[in-house]
Image: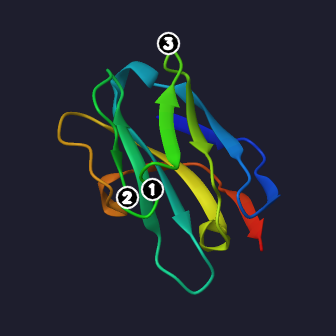
Amino acid sequence: QVQLMESVGGSVQTGGSLRLSCAVSGFVSSINCMAWFRQAPGKEREGVATIYSNGGTPVYADSVKGRFAISQDNAKKTLFLQMRSLKPDDTAMYYCAAVLGPGVCLLVSRHYNYWGQGTQVTVSS
């Protein structure tokens, strides 16, 4: 089993920055992919960024490329999402996610079987 817990999100104005973190516990060594997703009211859950647990080039949604950066600490027990140049369209509940076993890391929610409880990010104009 894997447990995920996101840090508290926050509220910022357009152009501001926030960093989210996700504490990972349990069978950490078995994790293959970790990712951030988000879901705005009335919209489907959207993949934001994903990274292989053993490193490699992250993959980003087009909507956040150049503004967001996913990373993990050396012990692989915390996942981060650095968000810059935030826009009102970035307002959503943000979730970290993990999947065990081999395979390609995808920005598809059904690919992941462990989820955090979510944290709210609000960007005002």
Closest to the camera, between mark 2 and mark 3, is 2
Query: Counting residues from the N terminus, which is met first, the one under dot 1 or under dot 3?
Result: 1
Give the CA separation, mark 2 to mark 1.
5 Å
- Quadrant housing the C terminus: bottom right
Q: Where's residue 70, x and y in %? A: 48, 38
Residue drawn at x 42%, y 49% is 49
Give the CA separation, mark 1 to mark 3.
22 Å
Task: Name the residue nearer the viewer: 27 or 88.
Answer: 88
Residue drawn at x 57%, y 87% is 42
Give the secondary structure at mark 3: loop
Identity, as a three-letter code, of the amino acid under mark 3: Asn
Q: Where's residue 47, x and y in %? A: 41, 60
Q: Is residue 111 visible?
A: yes
Identity, as a three-letter code, of the amino acid under mark 1: Val
Q: Which residue is mark 2?
A: 61
Give the CA separation, mark 2 to mark 3.
24 Å
Relative placement, left or right, of 100 versus 96 is left
Marks 2 and 1 in Cβ contact (< 8 Å): yes
Task: Name the residue nearer the viewer: 44 or 12.
Answer: 12
Q: Residue furthest top?
A: 74
Q: Crowding at label 3, few (<14), some or many (≥20) Cα neighbours within 10 Å?
A: few
Q: Which residue is mark 3?
A: 74
Q: Where's residue 73, x and y in %? A: 53, 19
Q: Where's residue 113, x and y in %? A: 39, 50
Marks 1 and 3 in Cβ contact (< 8 Å): no
How has the structure been colored for display? rainbow
Q: Is residue 33 visible?
A: no
Query: Counting residues from the N terminus, which is met first, the one under dot 2 or under dot 3?
Result: 2
Task: Name the residue nearer the viewer: 117 or 21.
Answer: 21
Query: Counting residues from the N terminus, which is met first, the one under dot 2 or under dot 1?
Result: 1
Give the secondary structure at mark 1: strand
Q: Which residue is mark 1?
A: 48
